[in-house]
Image (spheres, grey):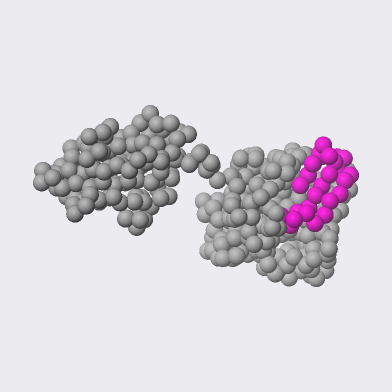
Amino acid sequence: MRSIGALVRDAHQHLTGSAFGLTEDYPITAITPVHQTPPVAIAISDTEIQVTNVLNEDGVVYGLIQPTGGPAQDATAIMNGGQENVAGLRGRSAVLGFSGLNAETDYDVWIAFKTSSGDRAAVKMASAQAKAAPATAWSPADAGALIWLDAQDAATVTEDAGELTIWTDKGVNAVAVSPTSASNRPVFDAAGLNGLPALSFDGDDDLEGAGMALAADMCLLVVAEMGQVVNGSESLIDFEAQNLKVRAGNSAEFRARSELQNGSVVNLTPSPVTDYSGAPHLFLARYDAAAQQIDVWIDGGMVASGNGYATPIGAADNMRLMRHFGSALRLEGMLGEVVAISSALSEDRERLEGYAAHRWGLTGQLPAGHPYKSVAP
């Protein structure tokens, strides 16, 4: 559930045009409001609101709170029935506090002002609660982020003259991912992938991380835009011991061939065969140990599926990005985000796709029936 104050902040700009404000103004006929600034709501918790106002004259501030849908209140009614009143001095803040509220109830806050000259006004604030809204947006951490490399998170990207030296993993192990040598550094591009921060690989660059956590049940997502391909073994992502990879699969096209050869031999090429280079995509593989199944999803649609996943992948492995582990073959392109979550549930796979699509501006590529095409999880 979103906090009371979060919804008050959302209902802004009608009077103030600022980040905080009101949605409706109800002045008494022919009476000029005397407040210098419109009231501002600040959330303390889901059951408390504070309303702050600054007067341009000495006076008193009154407040009345009621469940949404109640009768309109004029200044006199607010002054007579108000639960709170605070003396305000010119140029100083007067703060009203409402506590003990029901977190499941929508509220309206009515404010009135009075000075020694009798001027007064009534203002109604926005409804303060919405029961259906989530408290925070879904993120990979909500499904157990094993690996989480995020080029949009500047705190995780360490550069040297524009070249990446360390990409810090936000997953469970917080592993440092780095180029295999100083000559293999990708370039940080602030508008590289769909206008958003990404790492640019020129075909001679790569990244490697040791001890990257994996799980038998897992969804592995990479947000990337592939460039020119010259060898079918060039890999978007490759794990050394498990021999788990997503590679080009063709000497001139990136066909997103997914492989696992850790005792289970599973090779999946999306059908129909498509060249996924030249545009950003969401590449996702789902590993379901109980069903002994591996599925490949691109842009929210299943493109390949295969059984034979009889030997589950291990707990950790060494990972390379944009390079095949067994050779010096490297891939050209842009890399935005790499996420592995410890779940193979369909609802978590959909949430991960929806999260990434909204974050990278790729919702137009999700299929029409995807639950998060219009609204982020």
In the displayed orientation, state which residue is furthest to the left. 117
* Residue 191 visible from this viewpoint: yes
Depicted 15 relative to depicted 61: above or below: below
Q: Residue at x 56, y 62 (%)?
A: 196
Q: Residue 53 location in percent, x, y?
A: 25, 45
Q: Residue at x 50, y 39 (%)?
A: 131
Q: Nearer the viewer, residue 287 or 233?
A: 287
* Residue 316 visible from this viewpoint: no
Q: Residue 45 location in percent, x, y?
A: 41, 35
Residue bounds of the magenta highlight: 286-314
Q: Nearer the viewer, residue 350 or 207?
A: 350
Q: Nearer the viewer, residue 45 or 360?
A: 45
Depicted 178 relative to depicted 273: above or below: above
Q: Residue at x 63, y 47 (%)?
A: 148
Depicted 56 relative to depicted 185: above or below: above
Q: Residue 104 location in percent, x, y?
A: 47, 34
